[in-house]
Each structure stands twice: as C-alpha cells, then as structure tokens.
Image: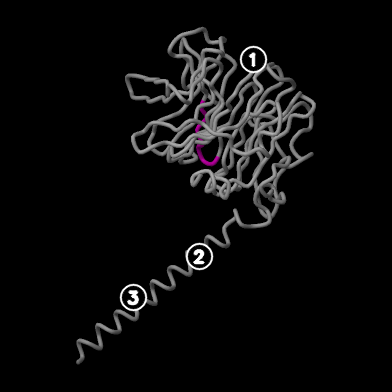
Amino acid sequence: MHKFKFTGMKLVTGFLLLALTAASACTTVKNSFWNSAEAYLGQMPPTDTPKIFAAGMLSDSGIVLGRIAFSSDGKEFYYGYARNWFDWYGTGVKQMSFAGNKWNRPKVLFENLTIPTLSIDGTKLYFGGRNSEIWQSERVNNEWRSPRVMLNKKYGLYNLQPTNSGTFYVGSNANGGAKNDYSTYDFCTLTMSKTDTVIKSLGSPLNTPGFDGDLYVAPDESYMIVSAEETKDYESELHISFKRSDKTWTTPQSLSPLINDGRAHRFGQYVSPDGKYLFYTQGTSEKDCHIYWIRFDTLLKKLQSS
C-alpha cells in the first residue's frame, strides 16, 4: 500500500514536471523575439503576396541587393549594398543590431565584399570577393574580426551556402571555364578537409547550359531555391527543387506566379531562420531594385504536397 502510494506520487510529480516543462517551452517559443513586434526590423509581415522589405530604411545611397542574413535569435541583420549592378566600386556589407528596445542604425561592417552568409553556428560570416573567391570573418568576444580569404581557386566560387551536414553548396565552374565565364557555372556541392577541397556539380535537372549560381539551400538540404530560366541578361525566375531519399533532386518548379510575375532579375534568395519568410532581390533595373519578402512556410507546405 505504501509502495503504491509512493509510486503514484512519483507519477503525479512526473506528470506535473512534464506539464510545466511543456508549458515553459510553449511560452519560450511564443515569447521568442521572432514572434515580437520588433522582429524583422519591426516590419509588418507580408502574406502570400511579395512586398518590399524595410522600404526606405536600408538604402542611403546606391542599391541594396543580394542575399541578407539574420542571426538565429533574429537580433542581428546583415545585407549587401552597391552603387551599381556588375560593378565592385562602392560595394560592401552593413549590419543592424537590436539593442535595448530598438534597432540600431545600419553601420558598414566590411567594404568590397558581398553576399553575407552566417555559418550554421553563427560564429562565422562568409562573403563573396571580387575575384570569385570566398572570404571569412570570425566572431571573437562578440566582435567580427577582419575578413581573410577562405577559398581562392583557379575556378570561380559564388554564393557559398553552409548546411547542417558540413557540406557547402556553391555556384562554381570547377568543371571547366574561366572564372569570369559565368555561363559555365553550375550548382555544386563543396566539401573541405585539411588536405583537399572537392567540388561536384549537381548535374541535371538542376543545372542548365547557362549560368547556374544563385541559390539557397535549406540547412537540412531538403530543398533548394534557385534562380532558373536565366536569360543572357541574367533575368530569371525563382524555382524550388526537393531532395529525394536517393539524394537526387526533383525538376525545379516555379515557386509562385506572384513571385514570378514577369521578366526581372531575381536573386539573393534566403529563408529566415524561423522558416516563415522568403527574402529575395528583384529588379528590372537599378532604379527599381529592392529586397522583397513573402510568407514562405505555408507556401512550402503547398509545394511539398503538390
């Protein structure tokens, strides 16, 4: 009898602890910064129709373009800027941070670098360089160190993307072609060891005879969003491909007619760490080049089930 009572008390206590833990976890998620009014620079989130992100907040001169990056907690924001398309003069990366109860004004983090990309653990920032190389900065004592060249090869490297497995995805012409011959770039995987760097083209159906370099890959490698149907002037649409169980990729399909609503440059695709929103750069010219965002988690579910 006493043993039964003791066991029952343990069970009740256990259930109470589980309930409290679950409630605490739900409260943590519910009250996370991502769900606050200050998230995403305090912007009103979009629905399934794309809209310009942070209009008027980011561009003080030149163009805001390319891929952005949010820290895992949503309190740091990185983006690229330039004076002109296809011109390295006046390019760089800016940073905004949420401190106290507001977002600080943008500050120049590094010049002459583009495409800021955070490592999976948030301790490194990767960038693209003007000679198709990859640069890296490390965070030490909460400060970003001066960038250094991480990869500089005879072939081009563009749009480096890390994943949970340690495999990188990149646009590259390692299989042949000059660095500046962008028509030879393929979507590739890149693996590194202490002694070797191996690049492998992802082949068909992801790659085409033209330029294949603008991409976003999910950290778990379950899907890729690519700039597809590229014209000779680099106008494109955004398509999505899913990774099959045998590690092959499905034929890319259009993300949405609301995204692909006519000829335009579309690149810099990026999904926020909470998985809710897709960001990308779009413009028909330098004058109307902006970063857009759209609700993505619901769109992704529709595409996965179609």
Which of the two residues, 35 or 277, is positioned nearer the viewer here?
A: 277
Q: Residue at point 37% right, 20% down? A: 198
Residue to which mark 1 is pinned: 232
Q: CA distance from mark 3 to mark 1?
A: 64 Å
Q: Main secondary structure of the magenta part?
A: strand
Depth check, mark 3 against mark 1: the one in front is: 1
Residue to which mark 2 is pinned: 26
Asked whether disc 2 touches disc 1, contact meaning CB atoms under 8 Å apart, the reply is no
Q: Residue at point 42% right, 20% down? A: 201
Residue 265, given in percent of the width and then of the height, sits at 68, 25
The amino acid type found where label 1 is placed reads Lys
Residue to which mark 3 is pinned: 14
Left or right position of 263 against 214: right
The amino acid type found where label 2 is placed reads Cys
Q: Secondary structure at mark 3?
A: helix
Say whether residue 265 is magenta.
no
Q: Quadrant of residue 5?
A: bottom left
Residue 285, given in percent of the width and then of the height, sits at 76, 23
Above or below, comparing residue 254 to residue 73 in the picture: above
Seen as rendered, the residue at the extreme top is 178
Which of the two residues, 181 or 122, is positioned nearer the viewer here?
A: 181
Depth check, mark 2 against mark 1: the one in front is: 1
Which segment did they paint magenta? 136-142
Mark 3 Cα-neighbour bin, 10 Å: few <14, some 14–19, many ≥20: few
